[in-house]
Image: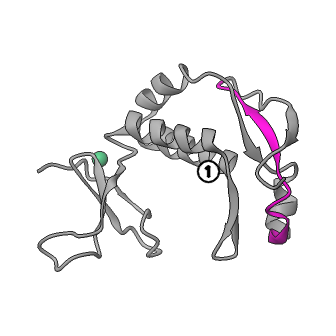
Amino acid sequence: MSGCQYQGYEFGAGYPDSICIDGELWDADSGDGEFLTNGGDIPCPRCNTTTFLRRALSDAKDGGCGLANFYPHVAMLDWEAAIAKARKENMPAAEEFLQDVQPFKTDDWPDRDAVFANPTLWDRTIEREWRFDGANGELVGQGCGE
Ligand SMILES: [Zn+2]
């Protein structure tokens, strides 16, 4: 059994509660101390970066938006957060993966600041095109809130 020493916040405790075992993240607070019982299906962003981004890309292409614990989320924002995490943990692997990702459209908010100021606007989405070059493409029609 080996890990990469990655510690993160994936299980919601508010402190670093995830540990990497063989490229998958586990909840350090689960189980009885000897065996962890929660996790094993979240790719590690540091040592399993390609799988981590491939999963995030699949989720992003599925689209979606919602409100979780009064906190609004939308597919494009989740995808950008995954990219930022992958780049922070393993820049070379992240860049290698991302440069092969073709532009695609997914759900976003027309004005993110407005949604964070007023989370009840979470379902007013648009479709936005993501591109590797950062030119956050044009807005095209309605997304997950239609
Ligand atoms: Zn790892």
Q: Position of residue 134 (x, y in %)?
A: 71, 29
Residue 40 within the magenta-colored segment of the rendering: no
Q: Position of residue 122 (x, y in %)?
A: 79, 63
Does the Cβ of the disc 1 residue fall within 8 Å of ligand 1? Answer: no
For the residue carrying disc 1, how many other residues have a C-alpha within 10 Å: few (<14), some (14-19), or many (20+)? some
Q: Position of residue 113 (x, y in %)?
A: 84, 58
Q: Secondary structure at mark 1?
A: helix
Q: Residue at x 82, y 51 (%)?
A: 109
Determine which quarter of the picture holds residue 62: top right
Q: Position of residue 95 (x, y in %)?
A: 50, 26
Taking the image as shown, residue 57 lies to the left or right of residue 25, namely: right
Viewer can see residue 73: no
Check the image and report above or below for 84 versus 112.
above
Taking the image as shown, residue 71 lies to the left or right of residue 9, namely: right
Q: Amino acid at mark 1?
A: Asp
Q: Which residue in the protein does label 1 denote?
A: 78
Q: Residue at x 51, y 43 (%)?
A: 56
Q: Residue at x 43, y 27 (%)?
A: 92
Q: Residue at x 69, y 23 (%)?
A: 133
Segment colored magenta:
119-132
Return the residue nearer the eye: 87 or 27. Answer: 27
Determine which quarter of the picture holds residue 136: top right
Taking the image as shown, residue 91 lies to the left or right of residue 19, namely: right
Residue 122 within the magenta-colored segment of the rendering: yes
